[in-house]
Image (cartoon, rainbow, N blue to C red):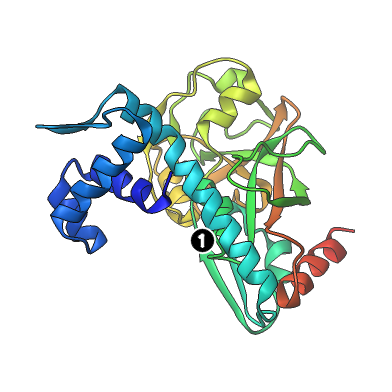
Amino acid sequence: MDPHLLRTYIAVARLASFSAAARELGYTQSAVSQHIAALEQDLGAPLLTRRPVAPTRAGERLLEHAGPLLLRLDAARAEVTALAGAVDEHLTLVAAPTALTPRTLRALPPTGVTLRVLPRADVPEAVATGAASLGLVDGLAAPSDPLRLADVAPLGVRGVGEEPVRVLLPAGHPLAHRTGLRLGDLADARWLDAPGAGLPLDQLRAAHGSGGFRPALRYEGTDVRTLTALAAAGHGLVLLPESAAAAPGTVGVPLTEPRVVHRTELVHAGAPHGPAEVFAARLDVTRS
C-alpha cells in the first residue's frame, strides 16, 4: 500500500470530508478522490461511504492498521537519516511531567537543551519519529519491573530511577493523618483523572487488580502544579511520585499496599550520540 494514499485516507476518515482533507493536505479535491479510489482498487474493497463520508467495516479495520504502519515508516526514516547524518550537538528531550524528577533534571547538560513536556503516551512516538533525541516516560510498576510501553517502533529503553509513591490529599481530609494508605481502601474515593500529568487511573486499577477509582474531575493538561492545586481544593485524590507529592494545603501519605514504585525510563532510537549520550551517562551516574 502506498503510504501517501494511506495518509490521504486517514485524513478523509478523520475529517469526514473529501474537501476538508484536500485543504488540510494541500491537494485538490479531485486528487483526494483519486487517492481513495486507487487505495480501494488496490485492496479490492470499498473503504468509505460517500454520503455521509464514513469508514466502511473494511475501512475501520484499515484505520486500525494505518496509524501504526505510518508511524513505523516515519520511525525508520528518522533512524536511517540520523545514522547517515552528522551527530546533532543539540539535545531535544521530551518527557512526561512527573518523569522530570529532581534527579533527572540535575542530569541535564547546562546548555544546548530543548525540553518539551508531553502527555506520557506521546513520548515514545516523538522519539520514534525523530522529533526528539531522547524521551523520559514514567509510571507505576513493581520494584525493578519494566514499564509496559506501547510498541510504536523498535526503541531502546533503560530504567533510570525508582521512587516511592504517595497519595495526595487535602490537608483537612479524614485520612490525612495516616502514616500509610492501602490502595484497596481508596477504590471508591473521589479521584482526579489526569492522564497527562498524574499517574493514570488505569494504572491504579491494574495495580489493585480490580475496578473502581472513578474520576470526579478530569484534567487534560500537563502542569503538575495545577493538578496539585485541584487536589488541595478537594476535587479528588491523585497518586504522585514522592518528589512531586508536595503542595500548599495538601498532605502526601505513603502508599503501603500494593508494593509499587514510580519508575522512570529513558527511551531512545538507536544508540544515543553526542549530548544525548552525555545525558544518558549522567543519569546512570546519578542513579548509582
Q: Is residue 238 above or below residue 136?
A: above
Q: Nearer the viewer, residue 269 or 120?
A: 269
Residue holding disc 1: 117
**Quadrant housing residue 199:** top right
Q: Is residue 49 left or right of residue 162?
A: left
User: If the image is split into quadrants, where does the C terminus sit?
Assistant: bottom right
Residue at the extreme right of the image, as rendered? 288
Residue 96 visible from this viewpoint: no
Q: How many marks?
A: 1
Left or right for 226, reference 259: left
As drawn, which residue projects farthest toward the left? 51
Could one spot residue 187 in this view of the protein?
yes
* Front-lying residue, 73 or 249: 73
Q: Position of residue 42 (x, y in %)?
A: 36, 37
Which percent across, then down, holds residue 163? 75, 46
At 71% from the left and 78% from the top, the residue drawn is: 109
Residue located 67% across and 74% down the image: 84
Is 2 left or right of 272, judged from the image as shown?
Answer: left
Q: Which of 285 and 62 lies nearest the eye of the viewer?
A: 62
Q: Residue at x 51, y 61 (%)?
A: 117
Residue 128 image position (x, y, % from top left): 59, 56
- 168, above or below 275, in the image: above
Question: From the image, which quarter does the N terminus lie in?
Answer: top left
Residue 152 x/y as whole percent: 58, 45
Query: Three-letter amino acid code at disc 1?
Result: Val
Q: Does residue 204 lie above or below 253 as drawn?
A: above
- The residue nearer to you, when weighing 97 against 232, is 97
Label 1 element class: strand
Q: How many other residues sit within 10 Å of disc 1, few (<14), some (14-19) or many (≥20)?
A: many
